[in-house]
Amino acid sequence: MELRSFSRQPDGILANPRLGREEVLEGEHPQDARLARQSIWLSPSLIAEYIQLFFNFIIGTIGLSLAIKFILMIRNDVNLKLEHNVREELDKIATCKSRYFENQCEPHMRVPALEVRCNEWSKCMNKEIVSGSDYQWAKAWARTLAEVINAFFEAFSIRSFLFILISIIGIIFVTNTSFGSYRVYLNNKDTKSVRHA
């Protein structure tokens, strides 16, 4: 009994170097060996998976960029409102200071009739401005977010908003379902062709 020397190639086919020909492994169909030789990168199922992944990546990137732009827009609005509030407070302080000195409210020159007003102006001009405290920040965020949402819903009716939302969800759902069905179809087609061979 002669031992034959075979070497296994990467595609699953045994090659006999002495005879210079390829033989199929025992128990394997010739169809399986041919399919094994095909490049995996040319598989329609794999291509469909990559296209679906790319599509979902694009949708996710668009959604993420819109969310980031929305947050940055609100943050800019909040910063502008906080700056506006600080400017208003500085204007009030400047007004109080000018009235304090115009009416000669220094303690040694103060007129008794202006005692209450001078005390108010003194408190006002000595008020410390705390810009960007957590309370002011949260209040400005809530106010700005409410304004943006109200402006958004004033521009759109509920029907148009629901139509846009359902359209976006529908496109994503239909596309992913189509790619999934296509892969199932290809897998069933491949298994049927292997069974019939």
Image (cartoon, grey):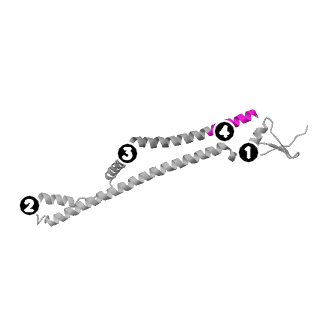
Residue 194, relative to residue 54: is it above or below?
above
Distance of label 3 from label 4 (alpha carbons) = 45 Å
Pick whichever of labels 3 and 2 is earlier in the sequence.
2
Looking at this view, is 34 or 173 the one in front? 173
Residue at 50% over, 50% down? 62
Q: Residues within 10 Å of mark 3 (few under 14, many from 20)?
A: few
Pick whichever of labels 4 and 1 is earlier in the sequence.
1
| In this rendering, the label closer to the viewer, 4 or 1 | 4
Taken as a whole, is the magenta stretch helix, strand or loop? helix
The span shown in magenta is 182-196
Residue under label 2, please give it: 112
Residue at 37% over, 45% down? 153
Residue at 70% over, 35% down? 191
Residue under label 1, please give it: 38
Residue under label 4, please give it: 186
Q: CB under 8 Å between callouts 3 and 2? A: no
Residue 189, relative to residue 150: is it above or below?
above
Element under disc 3: helix
Horizontal arrangement in the rendering, residue 44 relative to residue 79 (left or right): right
Residue under label 3, please give it: 153
Q: CB under 8 Å between callouts 1 and 2? A: no
| In this rendering, the label closer to the viewer, 2 or 4 | 4
Mark 4: amino acid: Leu
Residue 2 placement (x, y as % from top left): 90, 39
Horizontal arrangement in the rendering, residue 159 relative to residue 143 (left or right): right
Residue 93 placement (x, y as % from top left): 23, 61
Q: Where, quadrant-wise, is the C terminus in this rendering?
A: top right
Q: Residues within 10 Å of mark 2 (few under 14, many from 20)?
A: few
Distance of label 2 from label 4 (alpha carbons) = 96 Å
* The disc label shown at residue 80, or none: none
